[in-house]
Image (cartoon, helix red, strand yellow):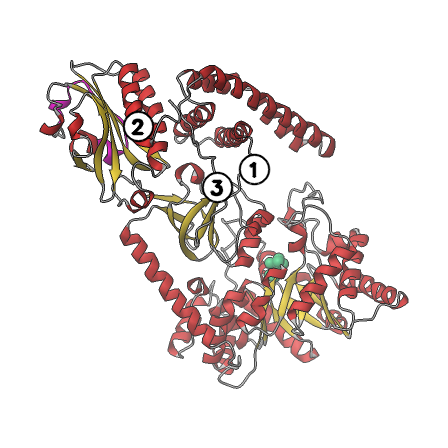
């Protein structure tokens, strides 16, 4: 039947085929039109003149009930059902039993397929399953846009469209709207019903063999390259690909008359429906494997190597199970509005890149790929970790209003870009940004920041598959300095370990990674690695200012050792005739409290001190920053933490060593206000925070803040936040949360 005439003819043929197959007197197909109207498009058994005339609203009659509930309905005595609506033009009076199934595509109801029998009878599970199989085929046909125009399909209202709210975790804040683009787009099935099942069996057999062969090669290669866990995982994947139950069910579907592709897809739809209820993580991971295998098999069947999305909408919300950072960058940044991941964690590589691109991300969004269809409108709320799928008008309006308000705020901050960051008591404050990728460099100019206060060098390392050698690193750091265009850039040497792992540097198996082998500890234990990085930094900074800081220094001797390595690289460059940096400033990340008791020695050796308040708080309070149970248990605005910063600021001032803060604290207006009160004059923050922080700076008198805050440091309360907030309110300080800026 495939290819026989136009879509209407195919639909007519399908209803005839079903009626014959299920020995039904009637088989009809209703399709959804704009305005949530179900129109009779094809029938055998009802009055042919009713075709394109009989129309029902969603919720009206039994057909409308199936559409409204998106569930199958089987009734032995249909006329006695309270929702039964008799339509005289159809001539359906004599038929007593009715079975209807929704035509579903990605959670959206496209129509209803109905069979009717003259006598009262019950419908078996097998019959309902057959009907659902065919419904999938018809839904595909209905979505192709030939029967009901594509424009009309997309403008169909909310009824019959399953608006859904998917919960995940906010990986990057912000609010965005756009159209879903599935990163792993399923191949569109052009032929659904096969003329020659034998030919389909042959194609299927061939595709399965080539798929098995390619998986065998993959497993073999990975055994050689990475013995252990990865190869074991792939081995179980290979076993799964040979699963007789899975392949057998696909063969059964082909035997029912589907093309091999439609059969593969049909079995996967069944799996998805069945597994939708299952919460067990092991079984859900198996479904992921099956999704992956389904795609592989479909690609082998179609002969297409990889599905590449060609025409992208202007407002792309990318939906993926998991995504590599490079894959995200393959998409046109200008069109990219948000990212939804079924997996993903805040420290994943793709999250880092998405943050650099400043797009909201919701991760751990279970079932996103099976519940979202390409082209679906989505609202992504990164602040609350939610995705609204096919939202109704009211939600779209509310989101659009919230976005417009944020855009207004952005504009007002933008207008302040070139104004000086000076407090009301005439204290100039240096505002810098934190960065980690070259693509972030334009943010210096965009935000009006003075430079990069923290360049996290591990980020370019994390997004690469292999360790970058001296030449690659030199090129990278040169590019960063080039793009900074004279603005100061402070490079932090590799801060890996703990929760930051490199694909090519095996993570140490540690009970307590935050207290383990990370950052400068690795650098000093593997000096070749650190020296290569320092060599590249020295070369990149030839003729320019070089600013370097070392992470997680716990004692002055560690700083001295690291500094010596840098001096050796400077000497080596001189010997090799490489132009030296025009100036070299070396500092320390102040993150481990032990340094507080070596301040005299430290301040004699360093050119600057930079507080990593995220880690300093973690180690001071003994509370894992990544553990949601304790991560926010202690407030940086507590007397204890502020006292530490107060003492440090005082000592740095006395020693004339510049002090900056580059942890999260510096990005939050209320916290930053307190820091200014303690005498901190350099803040480095996430680029989005520059506007709100500058507004705060310009709205406060830092001396007044200090006079208010310092006496409170000897208090007993857990947090000074409420008092600082009240102070801000009483003194007209601008402390708007940065989450509202995107
Ligand atoms: C910090 O610890 O505050 C910091 C800036 O470093 P990171 O967040 O990269 O550990
Ligand atoms: Mg840190």
Q: Is mark 2 within 8 Å of ligand 1?
A: no
- Taking the image as shown, residue 90 lies to the left or right of residue 645, namely left
Mark 2 or mark 1: whose residue is earlier in sequence: 2
SS for callout 3: loop
Q: Quadrant of residue 606?
A: bottom right
Instruction: Tell me if mark 2 has few (under 14), some (14-19) or many (20+) residues whose alpha carbon lies within 10 angstroms of its own.
Output: few
- Say which of 38 and 12 sits in front: 12
Specify the segment rendered in magenta.
65-81
Residue that badge 3 annotates: 342
Q: Disc 2 to disc 3, how far (Cα)? A: 40 Å
Mark 3 or mark 1: whose residue is earlier in sequence: 1
In this view of the protein, can residue 86 be seen by the observer?
A: no
Furthest-front residue in view? 5
Q: Disc 2 to disc 1, how far (Cα)? A: 33 Å
x 57%, y 50%: residue: 330
Expressed as whole percent of the image width and height from the top left, the position of residue 26 reads: 21, 20
Instruction: Tell me if mark 1 has few (under 14), some (14-19) or many (20+) residues whose alpha carbon lies within 10 angstroms of its own.
Output: few
Residue that badge 2 annotates: 9
x 29%, y 41%: residue: 161
Residue that badge 1 annotates: 306
Q: Disc 3 to disc 1, how far (Cα)? A: 20 Å
| Comparing labels 2 and 1, the label whose residue is closer to the camera | 2
Q: Is residue 425 above or below residue 67?
A: below
């Amino acid at each position: 039947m495939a290819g026989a005439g136009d879509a209407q003819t195919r639909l007519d043929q399908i209803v005839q085929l079903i009626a014959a197959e299920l020995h039904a007197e009637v088989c009809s197909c209703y399709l959804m039109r704009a305005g949530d109207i179900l129109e009779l498009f094809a029938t055998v058994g009802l009055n042919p003149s009713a075709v394109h005339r009989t129309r029902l609203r969603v919720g009206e009659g039994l057909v409308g009930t199936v559409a409204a509930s998106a569930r199958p309905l089987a009734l032995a005595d249909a006329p006695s059902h309270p929702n039964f609506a008799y339509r005289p033009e159809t001539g359906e009076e004599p038929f007593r039993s009715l079975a209807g199934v929704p035509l579903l595509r990605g959670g959206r109801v496209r129509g209803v397929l109905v069979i009717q029998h003259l006598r009262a009878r019950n419908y078996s599970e097998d019959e309902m399953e057959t009907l659902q199989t065919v419904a999938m085929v018809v839904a595909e046909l209905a979505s192709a846009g030939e029967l009901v125009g594509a424009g009309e399909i997309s403008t169909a209202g909310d009824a019959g469209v399953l608006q859904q709210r998917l919960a995940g975790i906010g990986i990057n804040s912000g609010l965005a709207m756009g159209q879903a683009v599935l990163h792993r787009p399923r191949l569109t099935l052009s032929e659904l019903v096969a003329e020659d099942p034998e030919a389909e069996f042959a194609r299927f057999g061939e595709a399965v063999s080539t798929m098995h062969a390619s998986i065998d090669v993959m497993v073999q290669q990975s055994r050689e390259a990475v013995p252990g866990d990865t190869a074991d995982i792939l081995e179980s994947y290979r076993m799964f690909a040979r699963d007789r139950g899975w392949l057998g069910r696909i063969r059964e579907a082909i035997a029912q008359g589907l093309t091999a592709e439609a059969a593969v897809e049909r079995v996967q739809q069944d799996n998805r429906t069945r597994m939708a209820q299952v919460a067990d993580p092991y079984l859900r991971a198996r479904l992921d494997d099956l999704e992956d295998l389904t795609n592989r098999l479909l690609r082998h069947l179609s002969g297409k190597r990889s599905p590449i999305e060609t025409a992208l909408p202007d407002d792309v919300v990318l939906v993926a199970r998991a995504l590599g950072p490079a894959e995200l960058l393959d998409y046109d940044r200008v069109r990219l509005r948000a990212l939804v991941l079924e997996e993903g964690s805040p420290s994943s590589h793709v999250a880092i890149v998405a943050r650099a691109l400043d797009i909201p991300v919701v991760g751990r969004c279970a079932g996103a790929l099976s519940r979202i269809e390409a082209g679906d409108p989505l609202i992504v709320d990164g602040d609350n970790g939610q995705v609204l799928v096919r939202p109704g008008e009211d939600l779209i309006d509310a989101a659009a209003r919230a976005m417009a308000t944020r855009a207004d705020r952005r504009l007002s901050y933008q207008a302040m870009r070139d104004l000086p960051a000076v407090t009301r008591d005439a204290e100039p404050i240096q505002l810098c940004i934190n960065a980690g990728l070259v693509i972030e460099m334009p943010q210096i100019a965009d935000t009006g920041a003075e430079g990069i206060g923290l360049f996290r060098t591990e980020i370019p390392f994390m997004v690469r598959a292999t360790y970058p050698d001296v030449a690659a690193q030199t090129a990278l750091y040169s590019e960063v300095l080039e793009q900074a265009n004279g603005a100061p850039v402070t490079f932090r040497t590799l801060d890996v370990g703990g929760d930051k792992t490199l694909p090519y540097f095996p993570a140490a198996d540690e009970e307590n990674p935050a207290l383990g082998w990370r950052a400068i500890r690795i650098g000093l234990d593997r000096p070749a690695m650190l020296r290569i990085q320092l060599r590249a930094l020295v070369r990149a900074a030839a003729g320019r200012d070089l600013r370097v800081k070392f992470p997680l220094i716990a004692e002055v001797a560690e700083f001295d050792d690291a500094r010596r390595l840098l001096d050796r690289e400077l000497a080596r460059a001189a010997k090799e005739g490489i132009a030296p940096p025009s100036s070299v400033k070396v500092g320390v990340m102040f993150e481990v409290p032990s340094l507080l008791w070596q301040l005299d020695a430290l301040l004699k050796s360093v050119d600057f001190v930079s507080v990593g308040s995220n880690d300093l708080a973690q180690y001071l309070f003994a509370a894992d920053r990544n553990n949601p149970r304790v991560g926010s248990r202690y407030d940086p605005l507590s007397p204890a933490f502020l006292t530490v910063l107060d003492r440090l600021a005082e000592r740095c001032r006395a020693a004339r060593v510049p002090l900056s803060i580059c942890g999260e604290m510096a990005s939050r207006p209320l916290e930053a206000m307190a820091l200014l009160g303690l005498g901190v004059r350099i803040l480095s923050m996430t680029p989005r925070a520059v506007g709100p922080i500058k507004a705060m700076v310009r709205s406060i008198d830092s001396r007044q803040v200090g006079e208010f805050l310092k006496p409170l440091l000897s208090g007993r309360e857990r947090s000074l936040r409420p008092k600082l907030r009240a102070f801000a309110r009483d003194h007209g300080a601008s402390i708007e949360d940065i989450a509202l800026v995107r």
